[in-house]
Image (spheres, rainbow, N blue to C red):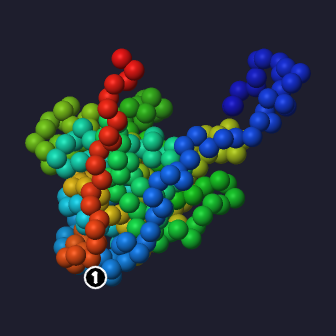
Amino acid sequence: MKNPPATEAPADAEARRSFEPVICYPTGSLPPYDPSVFAVARAGMELIETVTVQPRDAETFHVPQGHFLRVVCPGGSQVGDLNLWNADDLDERFYTGKTRALYGTHLSTGDKLLSNMPYLRPLATITHDTLDWYGWDEFGGSVHDVIGTRCDPYTNRLLTGGDYDQCCHSNLIRALADETGMNLAEAEPYVHDVLNVFMCSGFTLDTKQYFIKASPVRAGDYLELFAEIDLLGGLSACPGGDCSETHSSDVAVCSPLTVEIYQPPAGSLGDWGPPARSAYGGGHGA
């Protein structure tokens, strides 16, 4: 809480605070991540496409199910905002809220990126993360978050009174519109909360506000994901650069990102198959 409380604490305040926390969504019933499932595929996979995302802009890309994608930092330190959709149905898209509730505020190897309801299934699995060494720092920060929604022109307008069109939200809208033939207004509702790739972030220890700090990403680092279904992706090279100084502006030093698509050898995934959408019957108690 940022403001002093206006209500006097009750006599049993400490007792109320002392209850032990309970994990809301225990994941023990889910199949554990098994890197051996992907080992042969990763060892023999072949690069089939590279997409370059210019600073303060976004690009779309297709990833067939059973293929791998890497978000790569090819040069200067740079963070990216990632959207994922079902390539055959844009209504199914990455759901950061439920992903966060199951896997935590920051993602790394073995975590799955889930889709929205009523589908609620894995869109992708993280299979390698060259920044997994970072862990948690003294400020409570870590890398690859699903807590920041994406920089957007509406919040920028609210806070500064000005318009800025290179925010990640707008970048992703333009890229999706170019990909699909939709106009900007039609594309905007499909752009959603992101995986902040390479971003180092957390909540301040005092006011619990969202913070960003200089990313530890360096040239050659990458985050690798396995496509569980046919995916359409969108990646914005954030106008915050490495987020060490400012956010959503032309002031920060920004660099390109690349997306690499890899095809595994035939038969290297064994009996793997794409996940089915949620089997919930849809009665909703009616």
Name the residue beneath numbered marker 1: 44
Q: Is residue 48 left or right of residue 215?
A: left
Q: Residue at x 10, y 42 (%)?
A: 181
Q: Residue at x 85, y 20 (%)?
A: 10
Residue 98, horizontal then vertical, whole percent: 45, 42
Name the image quarter holding the N terminus.
Answer: top right
At label 1, the amino acid type is: Gly
Tell me where residue 241 sits by quadrant: bottom left
Q: Residues within 10 Å of mark 1 (few under 14, many from 20)?
A: some
Is label 1 in a helix, a strand or a loop?
helix
Whether residue 168 appears in this view of the structure is no
Residue 222, horizontal then vertical, whole percent: 40, 69
- 218 relative to 140, above or below: below
Looking at the picture, tell me which residue is in the foreground, 109 or 142. 109
Looking at the picture, tell me which residue is in the foreground, 178 or 22. 22
Residue 258, horizontal then vertical, whole percent: 30, 66
Q: Is residue 77 left or right of residue 88?
A: right
- 222 relative to 156, above or below: below
Tell me where residue 24 sits by quadrant: top right
